[in-house]
Amino acid sequence: MLTVIPPTLKLKNATFKDLFDPIWLKHQDQLFLTRLQQHDQTLYEQLLAYRHQHPLAPESISELLIACASILETHLVELFGIESSTTKSRQATLSEAPIFKFKAWYVQRQARRRLAKQEAIPSFQTLQKWLQNTLFENTALLYPSNGDKKNPSTSKTIDIEDPELAIALLGAHYLENPEKYATEIAQLTQWCIRAMNDPDGQSYVKDWVSFHQPHKKDYDNLVPLEPVIDDPVARLQSPSSTYRARDGFSLTDPRFNERQVLSEIDYCVYCHDKNGDFCSKGFPVKKGEPELGLKKNPLGDILTGCPLEEKISEMHVLKKQGDTIAALAMIMADNPMCPMTGHRICNDCMKACIYQKQDPVNIPQTETGILTDVLALPWGVEIYDLLTRWNPLRQAQWLAKPYNGLKILVMGMGPAGFSLAHHLLMEGCAVVGVDGLKIEPLPDRFLNQPIYRYDEIKESLDERIMTGFGGVAEYGITVRWDKNFLKLIYINLMRRPYFQVFGNVRFGGTITVEDTWALGFDHLAVAVGAGLPKALPIPGSMAPGMRQANDFLMALQLTGAAKKTSLANLQVRLPSVVIGGGLTGIDTATEVQAYYIAQIEKTLHQYQTLSQQLGEARLREQFDEQSLEILDEFLTHAHIVKKERDLARQENRAVNFIPLLRSWGGVTVAYRRLMRESPAYLRNHEEVTKALEEGIYYAEGLAPKKVMLDAYGHVMALVSESRFYDEKNEWVMSDEEHTLPARSIFVATGAAPNVA
């Protein structure tokens, strides 16, 4: 087996250890300022004025920071010696530009405006044949190195690896001489029209960003829904055409690729130069007059914009021109913990986007995409890591200060705790973080040696060992979010000379407030969570089969229950009901479905293994009547799952468990109001959409009344009272009761204040 030895980090006039030395950071900041002064004296003076809180117009700040960010990228590229890699990265970004020019001129300006006209246009097949021949004839122009890729004597078409880019390049070539190529421009425009209104054309360009058009926003119908046919509870579901096959606990959302990210950036109108970047600062009631307050959308959400006031528009401008490191530095000027935000975490920026009547710019995707692009560079992890401790674009905390003698204890290492720890460390404090969870140590090589490639620290989410660091980010967020980003934060803090972390420390038990002072700490920060789960005060709420939703998520994540090697005692049966309309309930519903498959397959494997060792008869003697009933239920279902896996393998397709899960009762989210009134819909309707795409049912207007039990005292069904709006538009109870079969019930009915 060959051992791959990563390259040695060769910093310009520095060592890896220097990156964590406040004195070196200060020296590096001075080198950057000198470079800036040599480049542009005015910029240098403006940046110093900005740091000293001198009043500057928002537009001037944006202009200043964009200019400084590009110079900072050059500085960092030279520091890490990655000129070649960043040039390739910039070229890759800029090479996508023809696609967006093609979209703007051919698709939007020409084809889209002519869609409604009754024009005599050839069929898509005819135009496609013309286009393929034309592309083949221009292969040398579009791809000089691949000019002989196809033999013209054997084929009239060309196997183009990226037809979208090839057609965009061809369209751009025609526009260079529109008089000469008037006929070709007209034909290509007709091809675009057919690509938009012909089924074959629509299928051909289905995933092309150049043909993607924003949808009009209907705030009452943000989630695609249809009724479940002949359902006694009138449940709702996602249209079958939107279903997504899920198998296991690997990352369920791979995020946008670079072209999709750049498409969103191209869609942005870059309004920072007019102080109209509402995505960052909030959407004022009247444009330009934020003192009048912030606008509410039709759902009643206040459009606050990014809570951190990230410079989003400026970030987009930098990324569009190929300055990816500069774009990341712009994000981190306000959000050094950016791996913990972005896609599938927060969307306040999207809500306040200038586009209020159509799809907004997907800013969380662009933010995470930019971070990912930097991490893909050689030493990208180290570039991110350095920018947390030194970022000249910040108005405050642009570099870490030396130790000031103050010692702070932070109780809780969730997002609030570790973010606070970062800012305290930046101010020169020594910080000890403690958490009630067991916290696994990181490998020494991540702490003491530079990381060449991000892939070195990445793990498949279905195989990674939970470190315990990150609190709710570790156990409360599902595999819809890439938890490898959490490791970036953990590594970043553990590398700091004045930071330590300890697990298995319970506030009020292992350590008290009085103990804190006795240990010599100067301050104590409590970050143990803001809410505690609410109990469900109905008969049968403590029966076997009932569980708090957040307890289920925590047990699933921290025990590794879904792993084949785990013996964790976490049992789920179908049908299942999740009570509550918040994001915790939505997350629980998706994970229950995925875990059920993993659970029964593991049960079958263990049963077969033990049967071979002990004999099946002796094995079954170990179970009581109820346990045997559940065991046989699991084994029957597991054999059906095995057949589906075998069939999918034969047919060379992804497995589809949705019909199976539904035949066993599936998972239903039951909410006491309408979906569009639920916290999940109001806060992040995209998560509701994604969950229903996995086959989840949704039941509206159900108020839990009691839990029905079987002969063993186990949960059997949930009885709910039906609620509806009366003529006064107020919720009232009807006399009608609905019974939802349920062998497992998960309670996600909100939280009470945590006053511990």
Image (cartoon, rainbow, N blue to C red):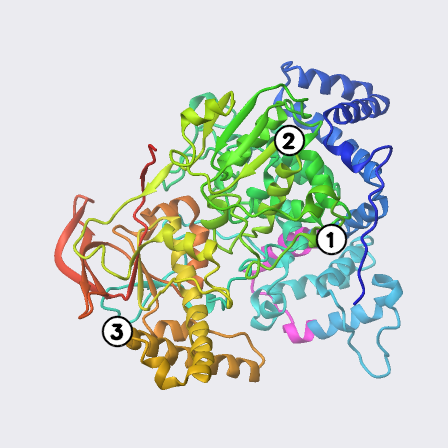
Label 1 crowd bin: few (<14), some (14–19), many (20+), radius 10 Å: some
Q: In the visual, does 105 lie left or right of 532?
A: right
Residues rendered magenta in the picture: 101-127
Q: Which residue is mark 2?
A: 333
Magenta stretch encompasses residue 67: no
Distance in Å between CA atoms under marks 3 and 2: 59 Å
SS for callout 3: helix
Q: Residue at x 63, y 54 (%)?
A: 260
Q: In the visual, does 336 lie left or right of 294?
A: right
Residue type at mark 1? Answer: Glu
* Residue 96 circle label: 1
The N terminus is located in which quarter? Answer: bottom right
Can residue 585 be seen in the rendering of this structure? no
Magenta segment, prevailing SS (helix, strand or loop):
helix
Q: Nearer the viewer, mark 3 or mark 1?
A: 3
Q: Nearer the viewer, mark 3 or mark 2?
A: 3
Closer to the N terminus: mark 1 or mark 2? 1
Q: Residue at x 22, y 68 (%)?
A: 232
Q: Which residue is mark 3?
A: 626
Residue type at mark 3? Answer: Gln
Task: Give the number of callouts.
Answer: 3
Q: In the visual, does 17 lie left or right of 415?
A: right
